[in-house]
Amino acid sequence: MNNPSPVQSIAEPARSVPVPAEYDVLVVGGGPAGLTTALAAVEDGLKVGLIESRSFLGGNMTIGLPVLGFLGQKKNQIIKGLPQKFIDRLRAVNGASEHRWCPLHMGITLVEPEAVKNVALEMLLEAGVEVTFHLSCAGVVMEGDTIRGVITESKSGREAVLGKVVVDCTGDADVAYRAGVPCEKGNRENGGMQPPTLMFCLAGVDTEKLRMSIANHTRTYLTDFIPAEYFGQNHQFIVVGLRELIAKARAERGLDIPNERTIIITGLREGEVWINMTRVTGTDGTDVRSLSRGEIVARRQINDIHTYLKNYVPGFEKCYFTKTAPFLGIRETRRIVGHYTMTQEDVLGCRHFDDSIAVASYPIDIHRPGDEGCTLIWCGDCYDIPFRSLLPQKVKNLIVAGRSISTTHEAMGAIRVMATCMAMGEAAGRAAKQAIRAGVAPDQVDVRKLQAELREHGAYLREPQS
Ligand SMILES: Cc1cc2nc3c(=O)[nH]c(=O)nc-3n(C[C@H](O)[C@H](O)[C@H](O)COP(=O)(O)OP(=O)(O)OC[C@H]3O[C@@H](n4cnc5c(N)ncnc54)[C@H](O)[C@@H]3O)c2cc1C
């Protein structure tokens, strides 16, 4: 008897689903962009709901990363407003450091992941945002070219949640993509995306020994772009480099280290560091099987990286493994095609835009899809994020904030850091609110009024060029 051919697809019968909630502004995704979107939108009494697929808020701010982007290349603070208010609240519970200058990353703001989860939730609840966890956007509710809400999937089954304006803060443009917004992925050559990393935490590290070894033994411990003196002067820091030590560990012990650079981030707690070194090339964060393979491969990489650090890097002699981040950190997936697509030239040309809604300065920082290296290019000052890059083509009443706004692969490598995503979120939330108050679609919002409201609430925008 012949084997039956494998089933390729099945038809899911159409059905009615309950609508448990209807909001003025529906925010999908509670990462850095989603938090500030919701806080800005709810400020003067609108009904705002935020749905989040995980059981906590914070997105990538909970995986052991420092927040980058508050300081510009001229050492000035370029992101203020709600993102700063969030950091102030974290600092009040010892959950964040000050913004520290770093020659490679410009500004480093260390944050404690558990504090991020708690403070974010408290701030949203205090402000009156209705937060629903364990709720994933699985589809959209459309009326012609206007989005009315999203179809959700959860323990409660399939439901619909509606919003007059929907803001997609999923990082993956999940809402926009399902609504039919044209999206792009990866680089021009072959669609290659920056590889993801499963962050992990080590304790028992003598970070004083680490920094003084780098400061005092400049020929042995070579760091990328950050001069050795910096480590002599700073107790909290990011180490990037030590390439020779990796080469030695590979040659002497055959260790399988998927990265040519050592990246160590000091934690807020004494002796604790976060390691940003696993790397799974070829992962597509929007494909569940690829994502699962990424989780498996990254987890298997940790052992050799740990062995390397313990045996070759000063200060790690007595270190021990404590935990992995709650999920594989995805650097890049979809980018929407919006009313304007930011490019490498805009970033490197320090471009001003008339419709600027945020100022950024982080360099183009691309963990290259095809090899073990990284490309870093600085512009020398700062560049604007235009409102049009948050507005998707083809769909009305939808705004996108965070790493999936309309950019090229290269520009995305610059705008993706968390302070910048929070600043975009604040603008998206205020734009959603103004659109509802004025009874217009977000692309009809008066940009001057939006900029005035942002400034009134403490956001930093550059003066228009004459
Ligand atoms: C390994 C790694 C290292 C990095 N290093 C730094 C660094 O040092 N400093 C820095 O500032 N930035 C760093 N970045 C970049 C930065 O973390 C991200 O670009 C940034 O967090 C993007 O913010 P976001 O709000 O757009 O998305 P995210 O932080 O990804 O948040 C998206 C949120 O939406 C939720 N969500 C997703 N899909 C759905 C759905 N369908 N339904 C409901 N909810 C959904 C997610 O659970 C998540 O909470 C790094 C990124 C990675 C991966």
Image (spheres, rainbow, N blue to C red):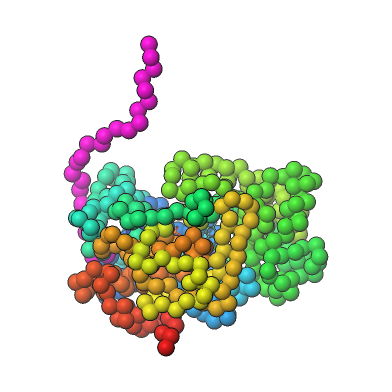
The residue at 29%/62% (across/down) is 398
Left or right, residue 219 beside residue 145: right
Q: Is residue 19 magenta?
A: yes
Looking at the picture, tell me which residue is in the foreground, 176 or 187. 187
Looking at the picture, tell me which residue is in the foreground, 66 or 335. 335
Q: Which residues are magenta?
A: 1-25
Residue 150 at what x, y percent from top left?
A: 27, 53
The residue at 34%/66% (across/down) is 339
Q: Taking 29 as reference, is 297 above or below it?
A: above
The residue at 58%/45% (across/down) is 299
Residue 447 at what x, y percent from top left?
A: 31, 78
Looking at the picture, tell me which residue is in the foreground, 20 or 257. 257
Left or right, residue 118 beside residue 267: left
The residue at 54%/46% (across/down) is 282
Q: Taking 16 as reference, is 458 above or below it?
A: below
Q: Is residue 388 visible?
A: yes
